[in-house]
Image (cartoon, coloured by chain):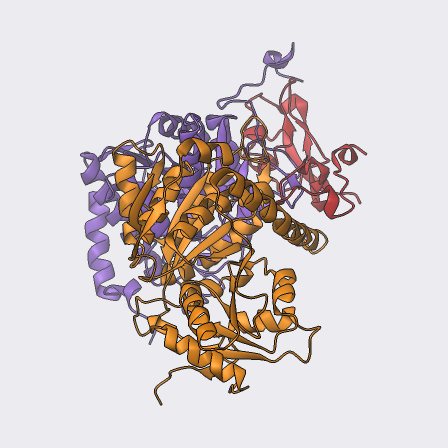
Chain colours: A orange, B purple, C red
Amino acid sequence: MRKVITGNHTVSYAAKITRSEVVAAYPITPQTQVVEKISSFCADGEMDAIFIKVESEHSACAACIGASAAGARAFTATSSQGLALMHEMLHWAANARTPIVIANINRAMGPPWSIWTDQNDSLSQRDTGWIHYYCEGNQDVLDSIIQAFKVSETVSVPSLVILDAFFLSHTSEPVDLRDQKLVDKFLPKYEAKWKLDPKDPHTYGGLTGPDRYYELRYNLQKDFLRVEKVMDKVHQEFKELFGREYGRVEPFMADDAEILLVVSGTISSTAKQAVVDAREAGLKLGSLKIRVFRPFPFDLVKKYLKGKKAIAVIDRNYSFGGEGIFYSEVKSAMYDEPHLPIYSYIAGLGGRDVAVKDILAIANLAKEGKCDHPTWWGVKL
Amino acid sequence: MRPSHLVGGKTMKTTIPKEELVYSGHLACQGCGATLAMRYTLKALGQNTVYSVPACCWSVIDGPFPYTSLQIPLFHTAFETAASMASGIQAGFAIRGKGDINVVAWAGDGGTVDIGIQALSGMVERGDNVLYICYDNEAYMNTGIQRSGSTPVGAWTTTTPPPHFKKSPKKDMVAIMVAHHIPYTATGNIAYPEDWIKKVNKAKEIVGPKYLQILASCPPGWKHSSEISIEVVRLATSTRKWPLYEVENGNYKFTRMTRKFVPVSEFLKLQGRFRHLTEEEIDVIQLLVEEHWADLCAKAGIENQFADKLEGYTEKVKKHHPQWFHIEED
Amino acid sequence: MMAEKYEIKISGAKDMPPMAASLGKMLVNKTGSWRNIRPLVIPEKCNGCSLCWKFCPDFCINIDGDYPIINYDYCKGCGVCAHECPTEAIVMEEEIK
């Protein structure tokens, strides 16, 4: 079934079609339509779930962890300040190995109040032990949530599925909502290996000394190392069932490109148009979308960036006192290629539009080797 | 000479169930009241129970990974999430047809009346089927005796050293719960396990949110020797400082009536944390006891046989310390 | 030693569940070593009320027989049992170490 729906409603449909059993959520702009729609799904009996209308995002995340620990599939959605409030529980979810999925609508952090997109909210959660998906379009949002549950439940690591405020959350696009039977086949009912059960009582998360804590964290990273393989398999299976192809990264006219853009989120679509326009103007431009940010696809970034004349990383985020966050990761991936020029461009913070002409200009700067490391593109001085 | 009734074996009388769901070897201090609170509670709840436990003494008492002192599943959670975690656990069970499991949020007083009050308030307002139990040792004992919103007026803690001892009264959490229209809430005391077990059993049968608060002595935090752990909390109730009552659908009922006047000083003098108090300051504490008692009597619709104490003390305290406990040291 | 049978052998990461899930009982921890004074039961004085058992914070008093039997493997020596005993059937004695 195809429907023209917003990114927010796509998230609601994803919760429904993945048969999420417990949803605990708190409203925040621009996520509110997600919870409104899930509320009506539950009220209409279209969705067999318990919706806990919690009093904060902190409690939303806690309740999802509890539901997951009890053996149920749990889902929530939030944004920005809400995700920041969850921070403590994001660590808790990952360390408790509860495979919950959160949709986060990227929104700039205050103050000043902003409701528009940038990635500093989700990237601040980089080290919490979650899998991170960055979405380009609404179909991507739906499919990523379906895939995220499968990957998360396989490796017992939670997933964050991230979409841009307004550019996706409030933008309507045609979305193939998938056949429920196919989704059920792809994503069977969650069966937790370890769960709260009075017939098999265990204490979870008790005080652990320096002699054992270290090994538990090693085990988490060991499972993170499995994620890439699991994802590749899941993407293959998804393609066979639904006919749509996904990877941890998405190259666009990258193979023969001389200048390569590294992008994420909705800027990826704009970058594709810029690539097409640049090619017409005679510039051999290509782009690489980072879809999965954690675990970072070091292998694939290396593969696609190797041998290029210049790389332009566009970051809709910033680590203050540091640099663009994707830029750091890309540089680290290309450590073995010391002669590859990698340039950093910051753009679009707080929802500032990043248009095709901006990306073309950035590509031309990279071609000429012009970069202030970083260049804050379009900043009014 | 052994009494004749003991001859023949198996003759020891018990007033509470014998079944134990806790193991020895736990890490509580000598004379710990919180362990008794757990033990009595599980005697009432039985095996079909799951606990959500935030940071509190029980995060340590239960024992380090890979060991536990309990025979029921326990999920350790962050400080402010006892209630929200329990709501999630309950929903997770309910959607899988296991709604009959007793889901308990088990928190200390700091995790309840301070950092956890928001999640608790949300859980109760939503009407989630969770039994919330606060074992109240009246300060952040696990972190080394810092004052909490549940520390009583007049008490020393490591963050309220005299003369800056606690100047504000203890937060009345039961009243706060009543204001939430909670179906059932009650106080308890480890010195009266029969009363407590009755209350837990009652709470267990009610579908919806329940809040119970049990006073549990803490020898290192209250500065008393471990052998009087029971005596000291027994005095908390017999001096009416910690009355035992329950509120069912808004109806107050005393579960233990006090007829004889025992001055609150009897309770205070056993504990080092009140050692610095002057007679006049103790009078103010007595006034607070009388005020609370009069309020409870009015709510329960019974005559306050200690009404005369209130009048006398009001004048005395007004004269010496007008609203003493609200005024910071100058 | 009695407690040893409860020991859980974990040599490294491979022996651990994904999260810190308990695998054994705290009975492994013989808290009797914390004790400075020890309770001594005088069976002749016991009236069988079991208050000592009821108020023991270490759950180490057995009342299946005619009088309380204290498990010194776990008794921390808090003294509650002796203090609560209405017939002085338990006395606290100096621990001999």
Residue A53, given in percent of the width and then of the height, sits at 31, 44
Does residue A229 lie above or below A122 as drawn?
Answer: above
**Along the line of sight, which residue is nearer the eye, A219 or B259?**
A219
Residue B21 makes an appearance in the image: yes
Q: Residue at x 65, y 73 (%)?
A: A307
Q: Residue at x 31, y 61 (%)?
A: A166
Extreme-bottom residue of the structure: A381
Does residue A48 lie above or below B324 as drawn?
Answer: above
Count of numbered labels shown in the rendering? 0
Quadrant of the snapshot with the N terminus of chain B: top right
Residue A73, given in percent of the width and then of the height, sits at 46, 38
Query: Which corner quadrant of the image does residue B28 belong to?
Result: top right
**Along the line of sight, which residue is nearer the eye, A191 or A363?**
A363
Residue A46, given in percent of the width and then of the height, sits at 30, 33
Does residue A156 lie above or below B277 as drawn?
Answer: above
- Specify whether C48 is left or right of A48: right
Residue C14, given in percent of the width and then of the height, sits at 74, 44
Extreme-top residue of the structure: B8
Residue B196 makes an appearance in the image: no
Quadrant of the snapshot with the C terminus of chain B: bottom left
Q: Residue at x 58, y 46 (%)?
A: A205
- Specify whether A40 is left or right of A375: left
**Along the line of sight, which residue is nearer the eye, A225 or B276?**
A225
